[in-house]
Image (spheres, rainbow, N blue to C red):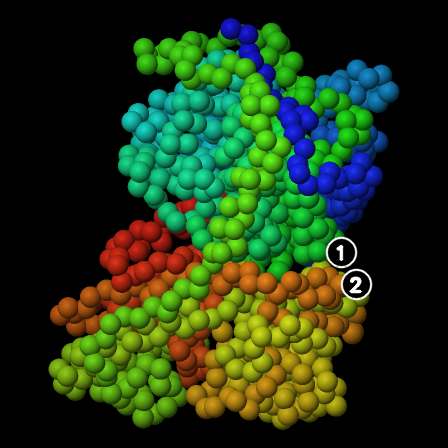
Amino acid sequence: MPPVLFLLILLGALCSPGQAMSREEKQKLKNQVVEMFDHAYQNYMDHAYPADELMPLTCRGRVRGLEPSRGDIDDALGKFSLTLIDTLDTLVLLNKTTEFEDAVRRVLSDVRLDNDIVVSVFETNIRVLGGLLGGHSMAVMLKEGGQHMQWYQDELLHMAKDLGLRLLPAFNTSSGLPYPRVNLKHGVRGPETRTGTETDTCTACAGTIILEFAALSRFTGDPVFEAHARRALDFLWEKRQRNSNLVGTTINIHSGEWVRRDSGVGAGIDSYYEYLLKAYVLLGDDLFLERFNIHYASIMKYISQPPLLLDVHIHKPLLPARTWMDSLLAFFPGLQVLKGDIRPAIETHEMLYQVTKKHNFLPEAFTTDFRVHWAQHPLRPEFAESTYFLYKATGDPYYLEAGRTIMDNLNRFARVPCGFAAMKDVRTGSHEDRMDSFFLAEMFKYLFLLFAEPDDIPFDVEDYVFTTEAHLLPLSLSMAPHSSPAPSNRTSEEELDDSNFDWTCPNTHLLFPDPAFPRILREPIRSAVDKSCPRPAPYREPGMGRPPLRAQDFMANNPEHLELLRRMGVSLIHLKDGRVQLVQHATQAVSAVAAEDGVRFMQEMMELSSQQQKEQLPPRAIQIVSHPFFGRVVLTAGPAQFGTDLSKSSTGVRGFVTVAEPYSGCSEIANAEYIQGHIALLQRGQCMFAEKARHIQKAGAIGGIVIDDNEGSSSDTAPLFQMAGDGRSTDDVTLPLLFLFHKEGNILLEALKEYREVEVLLSDKARDRGGDVQETEEDCLTEATTPTSHEPIGQSQMSTLELGDSAPEEVSPVDEDTSPAEEVGAPKEEASPAEAEPAAAQPQEGRDSEKPEEDTDSSSQSVDELLADWQEDLEAFKQMEKDEL
């Protein structure tokens, strides 16, 4: 049967009851998209090229090996001018033909693909191979037009084949699933090439190859690429759970066993489903459509809970695997439009839109009651993608307004002088020094197409299919000569069944019998999101009496308290980083009763930490508002437990910064005449935080910023903490005091060094770049956090408690600026305070302190269950960083 290319262009299906956007307004917004693209692209070319990506806060290129490693995220970087290649077909779509021709010449002359570097097979395929093929498609189209690229002789295609051959060694496995990484120069040889040692890969990593590899085979006539991609897809299909027809998130590439059995449509799986449907569209093979429809029926049966999309276990699909969603699932409404299932697409998109309006951007993950779960936002384009496809399907101008919202938020909160910066925390508006290549490859394509009229687009987009990176592959490839792959081993259950096919496009009049239909679907979802975000109730562990010393009264510098601890068998160990570890030895207590009191004290300390954690607000923001920053650089700062509460200030505190003398702020300020009326910069160390605050307040400062003295520390790699008082009343401190790690503090110091006069705004979250206060509606910005884990002590002879500063919202019960007890905390490599627990007979094991937090009730879960959930969330977070960044 011939392929049915159902791109579902449901144009003119209906008009919203709302007023349609005028052609002039759409033209204005389209031009604004182009201006935003120019700002991002030109800054990459001016400040970063030939590096892979732009670092927009420091206005330089990110070169792998020269910048601190970010882990798996850096596997996308291969020293092959990633952003330029990823942007090639965007230039043509935006009518920048001259720039495209220049970019192609640069790629051909400057880019090398034989670098001795290990890269992600998945990322290199979708970004670089896809970018080269999309660029080749555009070059051929322009050449055939007779006006541009007349010199082009398939050079990009030759590069694409070279790259494809360099990726092929990754597929040399017994299963046909590719290794997740390959060395561009040496292939997969084992540890000596830093490859070949992995055993696991994500489903999307192995299942998002077919479009690019099949296109490469069809363009070049070499079937080897398509054959390898088909083999990988066949293996994943064979390994699906046969009862639920779902696939897991992570699979062993050798045995085919599912390593992670949770299943959803977000990180780790997303583009596997996308490529099954689009492979049918591009290649015309009915088998892909049948597989997609079988999977889709299971998704709608088990995972879809409109408007939510919640992960389930593949063996127990009625059992939810988690209570939060990740932002990568925002692509799914667009895929549902392609499928022709518009109603759930409208519902899920509306839920995502309401979350976006509450937090300005989609957080990396958010809970089922729409609170922030993971606060980052690396300028992902999936929501814009679905917005475009829903507008195409419905013609509803509501989606034009959604697109306007996306643009406005990008310009207000992410735009910086050297491009657009990812959001480190959507709650505060703080930035991260990254602008991923997909921002240029995808975001501006979809926004431009959303507002453009047909005559604004230099070619017919209906002649192309979008890859997961929004690269354009021509549908004419379905007719290109190619060697037929070996027939799949079909079982009787896999014979084509017409019940698994929608052979015709949906009739839009049947889809939308009432012009108000989309609005009717949206209204209850909007109300549900608006009424959500209840504040978590304080967590309380039932107590068994109280020890002589209450945890809330404990001060590490109080000799009487230390003596009481000694009698209870509790000792303090001062760690090298200045923090303190509490350890209880029951055998060292003066009596059995005192030992029992010591155990209760440890439990109470953990409960106090958990309660304080829940009560704290998100981290604060330091926004540089003076020339040439104008509010576009926002630094993540830790708050203090004393002084002005910035969350209760509608305007924040604004002023010029001045370095205090002495820099430590531990004695009377010598340059008080310069500090007066200014915000003082101080260095951490030598005395208590509250003492510093009192000295600068006496000198007339209106605020203070404490900068970490630990060189190289950064909120990118270290968790924030709250600065505590000195054990005395701090009611006399009335100015705000914020804490910056060394890297963020250095940005401020360098700005002061270069511009001499630097004005900043201290606030609970970033304001608009013009200095206006954001809307103050209740935005549910407080993230649910994990209560303290508790482990029964029983007859154990020793317990350990490590309380630290591992979460932005968190505060240690005791916190000084230096020893003897700077913070009651764990070593940087050990447990986070949210998980501080007594441990029988040994100190508790280390855990990743960067793990985002989740709202759970530890009283109803065992420690093992909590740790399993914690590890699963951590793996999911790491997987998200790998997936389509």
Circle 2 residues within 10 Å: few <14, some 14–19, many ≥20: some
Marks 1 and 2, how far apart in space? 8 Å
Residue that appears at 52% across and 25% down: 339
Mark 2 — residue? 628
Question: Where residue 594 is drawn, which disc sits there?
Answer: none
**Residue 566 occupies which quadrant of the picture?**
bottom left
Q: Nearer the viewer, residue 837 or 128?
A: 837
Left or right of 391: which side holds 566?
left
Residue that appears at 76% across and 23% down: 459
Which percent across, then down, holds residue 410?
A: 68, 50
**Residue 108 occupies which quadrant of the picture?**
top right
Residue that appears at 54% across and 48% down: 526
Which SS class for mark 2?
Answer: loop
Mark 1 — residue? 417
Residue that appears at 26% across and 57% down: 861
Amino acid on which the number 1 mark rests in the picture: Pro
Whether the residues at callouts 1 and 2 have beta carbons within 8 Å, the answer is yes
Circle 1 residues within 10 Å: few <14, some 14–19, many ≥20: some
- First in residue order: circle 1 vs circle 2: 1
Which percent across, then down, holds residue 659?
A: 69, 80
Left or right of 321: which side holds 193?
right
Left or right of 458: which side holds 877?
left
Amino acid on which the number 2 mark rests in the picture: Pro
Residue 228 appears in the figure? no
Residue 418 appears in the figure? yes
